[in-house]
């Protein structure tokens, strides 16, 4: 296979895995092709974080690890953590279908820093359903639901009206 074709194919697969179509944050109804794409893109062995599993341990641990985008934030189990550039404050704007695809990083107590994470940048914000979401550097944090542990598939993906970006230890997004 030619190198250019391989790169194009890899980029196409990435878009299918993270959502190939732009959707609004409040748009509850994907098109039939989006439903089919989402159903076929989730791998059977890939765990899907949920609000219940991410909030099960008081004081969610946020740590760092190396990735293809440099050092970035992960939870203690190796799940990649993202920010949504559409959110200009610590108030989350990802609910409904958005939060199903991008589950918030939740906690039941003060989040705890490990590795290169700065404790002074970790905080929390209250979601409209009463749960507590972890923030870092003023950004609400999220997982991608169809990613396995130690996978980073959805950096620089446009979906739900903004870009999803991995988070560096300084609190900013990794370069796009």
Image (tube, rainbow, N blue to C red):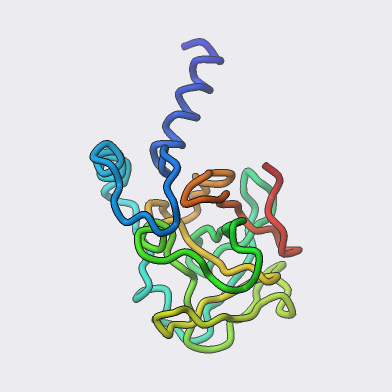
| Looking at the image, residue 149 lies above or below residue 10 | below
Q: Residue at x 56, y 63 (%)?
A: 74
Number of numbered tags placed on the structure image: 0
Q: Which percent across, then down, holds residue 59? A: 53, 85
Q: Residue at x 65, y 70 (%)?
A: 89
Q: Which of 158 and 12 is in front in this view?
A: 158
Task: Judge from the rendering whether residue 5 lies leftward or rightward of residue 83; answer left or right.
Answer: left
Q: Residue at x 51, y 66 (%)?
A: 93
Q: Which percent across, then down, holds residue 43? A: 30, 45
State which quadrant residue 169 falls in: bottom right
Q: Nearer the viewer, residue 38 or 151?
A: 38
Residue farthest toward the top in the current orientation of the protein: 2
Q: Which percent across, then down, holds residue 62? A: 59, 72
Q: Nearer the viewer, residue 32 or 152?
A: 32
| Looking at the image, residue 42 lies above or below residue 92 | above
Q: Which residue is drawn at 50% across and 30% down?
A: 11
State which quadrant residue 31 falls in: top left
Task: Judge from the rendering whether residue 90 lies leftward or rightward of residue 21; answer left or right.
Answer: right
Which quarter of the figure is the C terminus placed in?
top right
Task: Judge from the rendering whether residue 129 lies leftward or rightward of residue 40; answer left or right.
Answer: right
Q: Which percent across, then down, holds residue 84? A: 57, 58
């Amino acid at each position: 296979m030619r190198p250019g074709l391989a790169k194009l194919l890899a980029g196409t697969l990435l878009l299918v895995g993270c959502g190939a179509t732009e959707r609004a944050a409040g748009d509850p109804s994907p098109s039939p092709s989006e439903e089919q794409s989402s159903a076929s893109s989730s791998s059977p062995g890939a765990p899907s974080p949920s609000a219940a599993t991410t909030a099960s341990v008081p004081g969610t641990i946020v740590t760092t690890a190396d990735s293809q985008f440099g050092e970035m934030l992960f939870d203690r189990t190796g799940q990649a953590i993202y920010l949504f550039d559409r959110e200009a404050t610590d108030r989350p704007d990802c609910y409904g279908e958005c939060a199903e695809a991008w589950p918030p990083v939740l906690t039941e107590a003060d989040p705890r820093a490990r590795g290169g994470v700065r404790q002074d940048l970790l905080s929390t914000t209250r979601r409209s359903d009463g749960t507590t979401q972890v923030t870092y550097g003023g950004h609400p944090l999220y997982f991608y639901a169809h990613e396995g542990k130690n996978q980073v598939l959805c950096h620089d993906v446009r979906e739900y009206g903004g870009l999803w970006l991995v988070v560096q230890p300084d609190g900013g997004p990794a370069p796009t």
